[in-house]
Amino acid sequence: MMRLDLSIPALRARYLDGSLTPALLVKLLHEQMLAEDAALDRHLWIRRLMLDEMHAYAVALEKADAKTLPLYGIPFAIKDNIDLAGIPTTAACPEFAYTPEASATVVQRLIAAGAIPVGKTNLDQFATGLVGVRSPYGACRNSINPDYVSGGSSAGSAVAVALGLASFSLGTDTAGSGRVPAMFNNLVGLKPTCGRIPATGVVPACRTLDAVSVFALTAADAATVLGAAQGEDPLDAYSRTMPPHGYNFGAASSFRFGIPREADLEFHGNPEGPAQFAQAVAHLRVLGGTPVEVDLTPFRAVATLLYEGPWVAERYQAIRPFIEAQPQALHPVTRAITEKGAQISAPDTFAALYRLKELERQTRPVWEDIDCLITPTAGTIYTIDAVQADPIRLNSNLGHYTNYVNLLDLSAVAVPTGFMSGALAGLPWGVTLVAPAGQDLPLLTLASRLHARTVPTVGATPHAPHRLASATPDGSPFPSGQVQVAVCGAHLSGLPLNGQLTQRGARLVRLVRSAPCYKLFALPGGPPRRPGMLRVDEGGAAIEMEVWELPAREFGSFVAGIPAPLGMGTVALEDGTQVQGFVCEAYASAQAQDITHFGGWRSYLRSVS
């Protein structure tokens, strides 16, 4: 059976040209699911929706306008610790199951944006694990090699997308569950800033740390989903509306990225790991990145707190009435981990909170020197048999690079970057890009560029069609809160007034020239010497400029400090775009020297030095 291309742009194009309808999509997808069930037993579903159930969502879209709904007719899978109205939520524990009357807030928002749910997916029970084998519904098998783990806890969600049965899926991520399965199944995995997607209607693991995550074929698809799902929910005390993300380092021609010291890199015996990671670093260099070595010691110290500190007690609290009433209902490994939480005291909790605050302060300076951090998503991958024989240690290994992220309130995106060879031939490799809270879109933008460099290397798998990383996220649902300003004189980098920009958090975006309709004048007075740019009908030239980006909140104070005859106006650039920039009042040209023929302020300064 020919597989549908379920990438969001491909489906939208077919809906808009009339070659596909939501009703036809769910029919074709249902047939594909039946064929997949017959050929492969991956244990990815806990409750797949039947054709009539999917069809009801498709019919509801008949009167909608495909142009206005960003997820019109887009099929998605839901981790079975997230509520879908009328369908049981099990958290992979049948005795715990309940049938919600309302869907989780995130599911409601996605359906309102046009998305069609297709089923509830298997997981490590109560979202406790990074392996996908701790479930009474069976070990969820890897989409590429079924002898290997799929990654957890959001196991089935990743496999559903990787097998071409959903365009995207929802998972949850407390310790890496939205990232490790992404690597193991050749997907993009977005672990957004905690609280950016509300968790109302999600069975908690650690309520203070949980994040609803997104698995997608591309970073652009993940950004589209995030745009529809994000935003504060009054029913979730931990949800939040993020401020503008600021400077988009992911789109910049140059950026700085942290890499772990050699001593901090751990591949758990995987001989493929070092070369795979080095290749990903090389890709970022080509994209304009400058690597900066980072000491991961305090990050790793934070990671140990997650399962050796009071957050295990939080897992216990999340299901306390149930585990105290029916402890035998839990998977043995899940029970062994969770029951330890009952032994943690209040003094232990405060001691750990104090320690976390100390470590957070130690990690904070790192972000002053880099835009993002790159690490392996996981150092290696294991067979299902190996994990079942050694469930705690091997699971812990898979969280080596993930466990600290939510404790430090960071955002992260897992990106496929290659396939391994040797004993692990054909299995995917990937890295994770990490940045402070709120930097989801810059990370997705950079992830899209990095992913594009690996295509076709990671573009195809035996179970998913070849795919190109689609366009870099345009950021329309993600206001940057930045203003671009073109400067032509003393505010240029390295010149006396440049500090008025950098002190306000401005960053150089690009070198440009104005449209050839300006004259440049050396104004009297100083120091410092200052030029004036005047738009003219004839006799103008293209003037060398720099475009800087600064936070909108700082723009007013910057403009207030500009003395007459200069001011801020709209400047036309040589490439046809327009930005805010320095302009000069016409009267000032009478007392100024015309220096237009120099083509720019730096050239003029060299002539008079």
Image (cartoon, grey):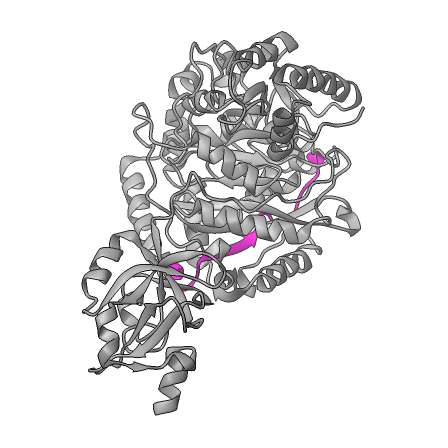
Give x and y (percent) for residue 444.
Answer: 51, 46
Task: Mark yes or no: residue 173 visible.
Answer: no
Give x and y (percent) for residue 199.
Answer: 40, 27
| Residue lying at the far bottom of the rendered structure | 609
Give whichever of 162, 70 is nearer the camera: 70
| Residue 376 lies within the magenta run | yes
Q: In which quarter of the image is the C terminus?
A: bottom left
- Residue at x 31% of width, y 23% of height: 235
- Residue at x 46% of width, y 21% of height: 112
Give whichever of 366, 355 is nearer the camera: 366
Q: In which quarter of the image is residue 539?
A: bottom left
Give x and y (percent) for residue 399.
Answer: 53, 44
Image position of 358 with respect to 414: above or below:
below
Please state if 301 lies on the left or on the right of 457 as rendered: left
Please state if 545 lies on the left or on the right of 156 as rendered: left
| Residue lying at the far front of the rendered structure | 538
Give whichever of 175, 315 is nearer the camera: 175
Give x and y (percent) for residue 429.
Answer: 66, 48
Q: In which quarter of the image is the N terminus?
A: top right
- Residue at x 36% of width, y 77% of height: 494
Task: Mark yes or no: residue 114 visible.
Answer: yes
Q: In which quarter of the image is residue 25?
A: top right
Give whichever of 108, 601 is nearer the camera: 601
The image shows a total of numbered marks equal to 0
| Residue 109 lies within the magenta run | no
Span shown in magenta? 366-385
